[in-house]
Image: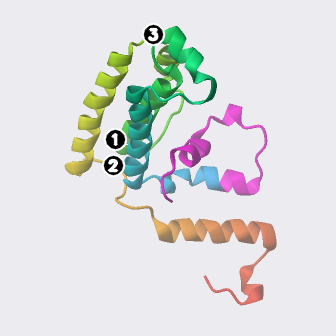
């Protein structure tokens, strides 16, 4: 419900990339769009800002100093920035998420096809676009997650696992 980019990505991964899924996983994936809301604007934007800050300040994470030596900047952070922006724009304008739609561009960034300045410019331009979508209420997703539907989904998942919750005095 918090719009965590890593959790949202997990819900929208392509079917052919799933190694194992049970009945509960199928139910959650079928209802995955109920987790999309304008809350994603804040969390995706926050994560993108974190990455751009590291990119601008040349912070080194683990062995990424090799990437910086090779490309002049951390292309992995840069690819995350571009991916997060594309994903957020899809969520805000379409109410859906196709993780593979812009994969060639994201991989291009990760392979050093964009300069650091191109990544920074893309980030700055797209942040203005996304801020305007959010500010002008042009987003197609709800303002906040549909907590009632998400709680019902949770109860349905619990009942698949444990049987009727009414047996233990729980009322829906």
Magenta-tinted stretch: 1-27
Comes first in the chain, label 1 or label 2 = 1
Comes first in the chain, label 3 or label 2 = 3
Q: How many marks?
A: 3
Residue 9 in the magenta stretch? The answer is yes
Measured along the vertical axis of the image, is residue 109 above or below residue 169? Answer: above
Q: Which mark is residue 93?
A: 1
Instruction: Give how far apart the Cα atoms at labels 1 and 2 are.
Output: 6 Å
Is residue 75 in sight in this rendering? Answer: yes
Q: Are marks 1 and 2 in contact (CB under 8 Å)?
A: yes
Measured along the vertical axis of the image, is residue 92 above or below residue 112? Answer: below
Comes first in the chain, label 1 or label 3 = 1
Q: Quadrant of residue 49?
A: top left
Q: Label 3, on which residue?
A: 113
Q: Nearer the viewer, mark 3 or mark 2?
A: 3
SS for callout 3: loop
Residue at point 54% right, 65% down?
A: 150
């Amino acid at each position: 419900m918090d719009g965590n980019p890593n959790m949202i990505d997990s819900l929208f991964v392509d079917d052919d990339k799933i190694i194992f899924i049970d009945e509960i996983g199928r139910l959650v994936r079928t209802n995955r769009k109920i987790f999309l809301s304008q809350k994603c604007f804040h969390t995706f934007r926050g994560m993108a800002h974190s990455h751009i800050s590291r990119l601008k300040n040349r912070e080194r994470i683990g062995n990424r100093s090799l990437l910086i030596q090779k490309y002049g900047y951390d292309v992995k952070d840069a690819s995350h920035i571009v991916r997060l922006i594309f994903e957020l724009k899809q969520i805000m304008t379409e109410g859906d998420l196709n993780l593979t739609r812009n994969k060639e561009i994201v991989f291009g960034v990760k392979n050093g096809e964009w300069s650091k300045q191109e990544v920074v410019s893309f980030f700055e331009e797209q942040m203005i676009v996304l801020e305007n979508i959010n500010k002008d209420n042009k987003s197609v997703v709800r303002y906040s997650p549909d907590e009632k539907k998400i709680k019902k989904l949770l109860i349905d998942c619990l009942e698949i696992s444990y049987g009727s919750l009414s047996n233990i005095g729980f009322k829906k």
